[in-house]
Amino acid sequence: MTTNIEAVVPAPADALRSRSLAALTWRRLFKQRNAIVGMAILLFLTLVAIFAPLLAPYDPVQSLLGIETLKEREAPCIHILGCPEDKPQHIMGIDANYRDVFSRIIYGTRVSLFIGFSTIGMAVVVGAVIGAVSGYLGGWVDNLIMRLMDVVLAFPSFLLAIAIITVIGRGLQNALYAIAIVNIPVFARLVRASVLSIKEQEFVSASRALGASNLRLLFVRIFPNALPMLVVQATLSIAAAILEAAALSFLGLGAQPPTPEWGTMLGSERNQVFTAPHLVFFPGLAIMLTVLAFNLLGDGVRDAMDPRLAQVAKK
Amino acid sequence: MKKMSTLFALLVAFSLVLAACGSGGTAVQDEFSALAEFEGLKLDAGSCDYGGKVLSIEAVDELTVVFTLCKPDPAFEAKIAFTPFGIQPQEHLARTGGTGELLENPIGTGPYQVAEWDRGNQIVYTRFDDYWGEAGAASTVTLRWLTEGAARLQELQAGTADYVSNLSPSDYATVQNDPNLQILYHQNPNVFYIGFTNTASPYDDVDVRRAIALGIDYQRIVDNFYPDGSEVASHFTPCAIPNGCEGESWYEFDAEAGRALLAEAGYPDGFTTRLYYRDVFRVYLPEPARVATEIQAQLQENLGITVEVVPMESGEFIAASTSGELTDGMHLLGWGADYPHVTNFMDFHFGANNPQFGNAHAEIYGPLQEASSIADVATAAPLYAEANNMVKELVPLIPVAHGAAAHAALASLQGAYYPPFGAPQFNFLDNGTDSIVFVQNAEPISLDCADETDGESLTACQQVVETLLEYGKDSGATFPELATSCESNADSTVWTCHLRDGVKFHDGSDFDADDVVASWARGLDASNPYHVGNTGSFDYYGYLWDSFMNVPAE
C-alpha cells in the first residue's frame, strides 16, 4: 500500500505562513477527485437554478390542456429518439395534471437548493451562537443549554420535524423551520466543543490579558477558529436537509401543489411506478444527484481541512 | 244461575288444566299475559310544531310498528331502507349509553357480526349462524382498506383480495383485459361539487360565488379527470332521479364574465383562499388531488384567485365541512345517492338546518319543504324547478360533475355485484372458500352508522345492522327486510310496518317492535339519553326527517 507522503508531511513553516488556511484548503480540495465531481454537479445545479426561466420550455405550474393535445401522464417524447416530429417534445413526459415534467424538474432545482442552504443557514447561525455562548460561559448556562440540546437530540430528527409541522402547520415555509430546528443541536454541540478547547489556548489568554472584552474574545478570537469544523458539518448537513425536505413533501407536509418540488412530485405519483415510471424516476434522480453532490463535496471539504483524517480513511 | 255456575266451573277447570300443564302451561300463560299486557314503546313529538316530519313512532304490538307523519312523505319507504336507520337491540343501546362500545361493536340482525376491528388495519366479520335470511357462504369476511386505487388493484391481481371497490379510471382497461378479473359497473347517481360557507368574506358575497361558478371550465375537468361515462352536471341532482333536472341548467364556463363579476364584487385582481379536500377516492371524485390541483390552476388562470390546496384527514374533513367550519376557503365534496329520490340530494344539502353552506336560504328550502310532501312527480316538478333555479341564483355550491364508476372482483368470485344504492352484501359473495377479503378505499369512521354519513362506514355497517326494508340488487326499489311489509293509509301519513317474526340479534335476543322504536328514538329524539353516537350529529335523522324532536333551546 502506498501513501501520499506529500499530503501527510506538513509543509515547511515559512511556506505555510505565506498561505492562509482557506487557500490551503482550496488547494487540497481541488486535489480531491470526489470533491471535484461534487463541485461540478453542484455548479451545474446552481446554473440550472439560476437560469431556470431560460432552460425550462414551459411554465412549471401551467396545465397544457387546451394548448397541446396530450394524454395524462404521457411518456417522454424526444424527437431524436424517434418520437414523431408532429408531436410536441416533452423530454421527461407529462404529469397527471398535464404539466411538463422537465420544466418542473428544472424549477425544482431552485426549490431544493433554497431548502438546503436556507435550513442549514438558519441552523448554523442559531446553533453556532448557542454553542459559542454555552461553551464560553460554561457553568449553569452551559449545563442548561446543553441539556436542552440533548432533549432535542433525543428525538429522531425526522419524527421531530413531523411533530413540529403538526403543531405549526404544513407548508414549505414551516417545513424549512422544522428542518432548521432539528439541526440546531448538531451545530450547537460542535461549536461548543471547539470553543471549549480553543478558549484555553495561549493566544486567547494573551488577548484576555491585554484587556479584550468577552464578546471580542468569543467572536473575534475564538469563533473564527471553530469555523472550519462548522463548514464541514454544514456541507454534509445540506444533503440531509434536502432529503428531509423531500421526505416531508413526499408525505404531503412540505411544499404544497403546485410548487414544483421534487419530493412532492415523487409523492403525488408514487403509485404510478409501473404505469408511468417517468413520473417517479426523474424527481428521484434529481434528488439523488443533488444529495450525492453535497455528500461528495462535504467529504472533500472535510478531507481538505484535516488531511490526517483523509489518510486514515484511505488506509 | 245455572249458566253462571257452568261458566265458573269451566274457568276453574281451565285454571286447573293450566296449572297441571307445568312449564308448557306457563308459556301459554305468559303469551296470553304478554298479549294482554304489551305496552310498547312510543316516541311521540306531541305535535308537529317542532318542524320535523315524524309525529310519532309506536310499537302497537310485538311485531307491529306504526309511523305517524306530520305530512305525506313520498320517499318514506326509500328512506327507511337506508342503513343509518338500522335496528339494534334496545338493551344494547342502553348498556353502551349510545356511544363507546357501540361505535366499534354494533349488534344487529345481519348475516355477519363484527368479530374484531383492528383499528388502522382491518375488520373481521364472522358469519351469524342464526341469520333469518340467506346465510353467507364464507364463515369469515375480512374488510380492509387502501387509499390508493393502484394498491387496491394490486391486491386483487395478487389474489390477496377477492373484491376491491372504486377502480381508478386508469385501471379500467387493465381489469377488462385480465381474464382473471371481472369489472362491476356502478350505476349510483352522484354529484361532485365545490362548497362554500357563506358566513365569512369573501364567500358571503353571492357575486363572488357566481364569479367562481362562471370561472370554472367544467367540461375540461370531466374530459380529463373523469372516466368515460361521466358528465358535466347541468343541475345539482343527476337527471336519472325524477325531478332532478327541473329548472334552468347550470352556468356555462365564461371566464371573462366571471372576472367582470369578481371585479364588481371588489376583487379585480382576485384574492387568496384555500381549497380543502380529503384525498379519498369517491365515485364522484376519483382523483381528488388531481382535480384539486386542476381547480387551483383554473381559478388562478381564469379569475386570478390564488388558491392553497389543503388535503385533510377524511373524518376531520367531513366533520369540519359539514358543520360549516371551513369558512376561510372552499371545499371539494360530493354526494352519492342513498335512496332513489330527489329529496336525498336536495333536502339533505339545502334543508333549513344544514350548516354546511352557512346560512340556509329560505328561497331554496321553502319550495323543497312544500315538494317533499307531494307524492306525484309531475305535481312536485314546478317546486323542484323553483328550488333548482334558486340554487343557481344563490350559488351555495357549484355542481361540477356526475361521475361514472366501477369496481372489480376476481373472476372466480360468484355473486359479485354492486347495487345502485348501498353496498354489496357479503352473504351473496362466494369464492368457494371459507374466507373472503373485501378491500375498500378508506377505513370506516365508526360502526355506529346512525351517526355516520360516509360510504365506508355504511358499507361496514350494512353487513351487521339491518333496516325495515332493503334496496334491490339492481335497482332502488325497496323489498322487505326486517319488516315483511309496510302499508300506508290513504294520504300516506300513517305507515304500518309488520315485522318479521323469529328474528334474532347477534347477542341472542329477540327482535321486536320496541327495538325499532328505541333505535329510531335514539336518532330522532335529541333528548334521548342515547342520542350520543360518535359526533352526536345524527345527520341523516335531522336532514331526512326535517328536524330532531326535543332539541334543547339554545
Image (tube, rainbow, N blue to C red):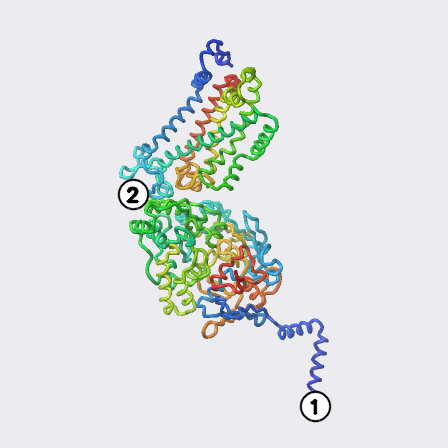
Against A150, residue B334 (above or below) is below
> 10 Å neighbourhood of mark 2: few (<14), some, or many (≥20)?
few
Viewer can see residue A75: no
CB atoms of marks 1 and 2 within 8 Å: no
Q: Which residue is mark 2?
A: A67
Mark 1, mark 2: which one is toward the viewer?
A: 2
Q: Is residue A84 left or right of residue B154?
A: left
Viewer can see residue B109: yes
- Observer-nearest of B341 and B379: B379
Q: Which chain does tag 1 point to?
A: B
Instruction: Name the residue furthest bottom.
Output: B1
How many numbered discs?
2
Secondary-structure class at tag 1: helix
> 10 Å neighbourhood of mark 1: few (<14), some, or many (≥20)?
few
Secondary-structure class at tag 2: loop
Identity, as a three-letter code, of the amino acid under mark 2: Ile
- Corner quadrant of residue A75: top left
> Residue B354's x, y, as percent?
45, 59
Mark sitting on residue B99: none
- Observer-nearest of A111 and B140: A111
Identity, as a three-letter code, of the amino acid under mark 1: Lys
Q: Which residue is mark 1?
A: B2
- Mark 1 on the same chain as mark 2: no
Instruction: Work out how far the residue at label 1 is from the one at label 2, CA to CA, in angstroms.
Output: 107 Å
- Corner quadrant of residue A102: top left
> Residue A84's x, y, as percent?
28, 38
Q: Which chain does tag 2 point to?
A: A
> Residue A85's x, y, as percent?
27, 37
- Observer-nearest of B468 and B334: B334
Against B492, residue B147 (above or below) is above
Q: Is residue A205 left or right of residue B179?
A: right
